[in-house]
Each structure stands twice: as structure tokens, then as C-alpha cells.
Amino acid sequence: MLGLIIFGVLLLGGAAYRFMTARTKTLQGRIAAIEADTESAKTRTDAEKAAEKAAKRARDAAAVVALGFVAEADLDTEQGQPVAPERTAAVAAVRSGDWEAGAVYVAAAGRDWEERWQRVRALAEVAAEDDAWLLAWRAAYPSDPTAALVDADTAVRVAWNVRGSQAGSRTTQEQFRLFHELLVKAQSRAHEAQRLADPADPVPYMVEQPIAQGLGYPHDQYGTLWAEITGRDPKILTAHTTALQYWCEKWRGSHELALAFARGSAASGAPGELLSLLPLVAYVEQELHDEELAPETFFKEPGVRAAVDAALADLGAADPADRRAVRLRHVLAWLLFWQDRDAEAVEQFQVIDGYIGALPWYYAGSPKGRYLYARDWAVLATAGDGT
């Protein structure tokens, strides 16, 4: 009898267990369903928010384009301004093998050393891809100073192309090895160009600047090179901006050394000579490489604002036809945007718009994204003010 009672209790207990288990599983299922519905609703909400943001961006972009600015698809990320017709013709000629046209193109710059540098660089960029025409030029006139100069700068371009534009942490050891090897060869060619050059020409020494940067010349050695350049022409803007890179923390100096050099360069320039660009570049470099700095506060600091004001005055005194001025306009547009001086920023965007192959835009992973973020904000903010 006792056994029957125990058996009955076990049966009832098993039934109760099965009931409670089934109930628990049902509740768990309902909870899981509720959670799934909640997550689905959240996902839908996130998707809706993303769609709303995308729609707003599209409306804002259309509004800016309607005001006469260039659409995103039409922005040129290679050039900072329209290419001069003379350059286009010279590049086409040398690509076809006509090195004599290239020689004439460089010679036409005369003793405008900044222009001579720009023209040599244009030909070197072509030769870095295909140098058959340059080899023919050098074979025909082995002692031609311009051919030697283009040859030296081509060697520099090839070396830097091998290294790439990524940060050191993203550059392979093999890239660094080849980079160093090619720069040593470029150094030899630069020294040859210096020996053949007009004694007044600083450009062969400017060609050595990126070599010094890549090989890591000690400060005193770089100072000697800098003296060779400035002794021939102390005001070449490209020479100054290239030297500033050497003095930056990311290369061979520090934020303090870079800013000191930049301020010295700016102080040496007369109104309209555009050397006021240097401090602005130094501030952009510092903000980019110092993780503790935020652009919305750093670029509003008194020293930066004063540098921007000085640059605006310098730009106002410059020759309107000076093609170097656009380099200053690009940086001014960026800093004025961060300083909430939207109307002044728009004045710069109106001039540079369409061509964004310049600092600070190419420092971003998405140059178009950085440019449009600043331009569209400033344009819409200004339009909203009715100004």
C-alpha cells in the first residue's frame, strides 16, 4: 500500500514538473519574442533616423548647389585650382615624346623661381610614370641644367611614390627600405643638378628638401641646405612650406619648432607675399597630430585667430592674379569655418570651389566629406542669416 502511495506522489510530482517546465519555457518564449520585437523596433528606429539624416544631407546639398556651388560628384580631388593651359599643353607634349616642348615650357618661367619650381614639378610627375622622353632629353644634352633638374625631381617623386602617403605605422619595412635606397640615388642626382645650375637658381636645392626630410638630415645639415635656398631667394613660398614639413613633429622637429619657423617666415614677408600661410599650416598640423586638441576650441584660440586675421590682410594685399593665393584660401576657408566666421569662410569657398586637391582637404580619409562638411555648413548658415 505504501508503495502505491509513493508511486502516486511521483506521478503527480512529474506532472507538476512538466507543467512548470512548460510554463517556464512559454514565459521564456514570450520574453524572447518581446525582446525581439523591441530590438526590431529599435532597428527600425535607427534605420529611420539614418534615412532622415541622409534625406536632410541630400536636401542641404541640393540647396547649396542651387546657390551656385559645385556638386559633390564634380569636385576635383587632384588639383587645388584649374590647371593653366600652358601646363596642360606642356604635359601633353612630353607625354607624346616631345621633350623640347618641355624644355621651352620650363625656360619660359625665367627667373620667377616659384614658377620654375612648379613647372619642373609638373614635368617630373609625368616622368615618374614614363621617363622615355626625359631619357632622350638627357641623352641629347647631358649637361643641360634643366634636364638634370627634372631628372633629379623625378627621382624624388619615384621614391615618395614607393613610400606612399600613409603614416609610418602603415608603411611596410620593404617600402621603407626601397624609399631610403631611392632617396640616396635622388640625392646624387640633386647634387648633379646643383653643380650644373645657374648659380642664382635655388630650385635644385629645393629639390633636395624632400630628400632631407625622408633621409632625416640633422638640424644643422638642414640649416645648411636652407641657407643655400634663402641665399638665392628668401621668399619662395613652396620652399617655406616644404621646410615647415621638416620642422613638424611628424618628421624631424616638434610643434614648437614648426610654429617658431612658421612665425619667422610670416614675419619676414611683406604684405601680399603670402608667407602668412605658414602659421596657419603649422596650426593645422598641430591639431591633426595632437589627439588632445579639438578643432572647435583650438582653432578659436587667440593666437590662431590673430594668424587668420593677418593672413586675410596679407591676402588682401596680394596680386589677384597670383596663383599661389589659392593655397592660402583653402586653409583660410577651413579655419574660418571652425571660428564660426561663416560669411568670411563662404568668401573663400566661392573662389576655391570645385578644386579640393589641397591642404587641408587631402589630409582627410574622405577629402570630399571634409570639404562638403565645412562648405555646406558655412553656406547654409550664411544663407540662413540672410547675408
Image (tube, grey):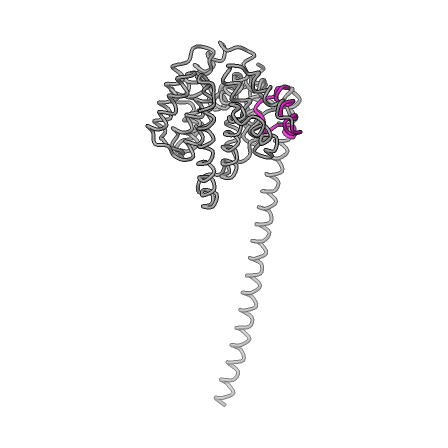
Relative horizontal placement of residue 87, taking residue 328 as reference (left or right): right
User: For residue 191, which quarter of the picture?
Assistant: top left
* Residue positioned most to the left: 220
| Residue range highlighted in magenta | 72-97
Residue 237, percent across and down? 46, 19
Q: Is residue 315 above or below residue 255?
A: above
* Residue positioned most to the bottom: 1
User: For residue 59, which quarter of the picture?
Assistant: top right
Q: Is residue 71 above or below residue 272?
A: below
* Total numbered circles: 0
Relative horizontal placement of residue 67, taking residue 279 as reference (left or right): right
| Residue at horizontal 59 percent and vertical 24 percent from the top | 355
Who is closer to the viewer here, 254 or 241? Answer: 241
Task: Find out whether residue 327 is within the magenta segment.
Answer: no
User: For residue 387, which quarter of the picture?
Assistant: top right
Residue 360, percent across and down? 50, 27
Residue 356, percent across and down? 57, 26
| Residue at horizontal 50 percent and vertical 24 percent from the top | 334
Who is closer to the viewer here, 27 or 49? Answer: 49
Task: Find out whether residue 88 is within the magenta segment.
Answer: yes
Who is closer to the viewer here, 24 or 86? Answer: 86
Residue 322, percent across and down? 54, 14
Who is closer to the viewer here, 6 or 168? Answer: 168
| Residue at horizontal 42 percent and vertical 13 percent from the top | 269
| Residue at horizontal 60 percent and vertical 49 percent from the top | 40
Relative horizontal placement of residue 13, taking residue 59 as reference (left or right): left
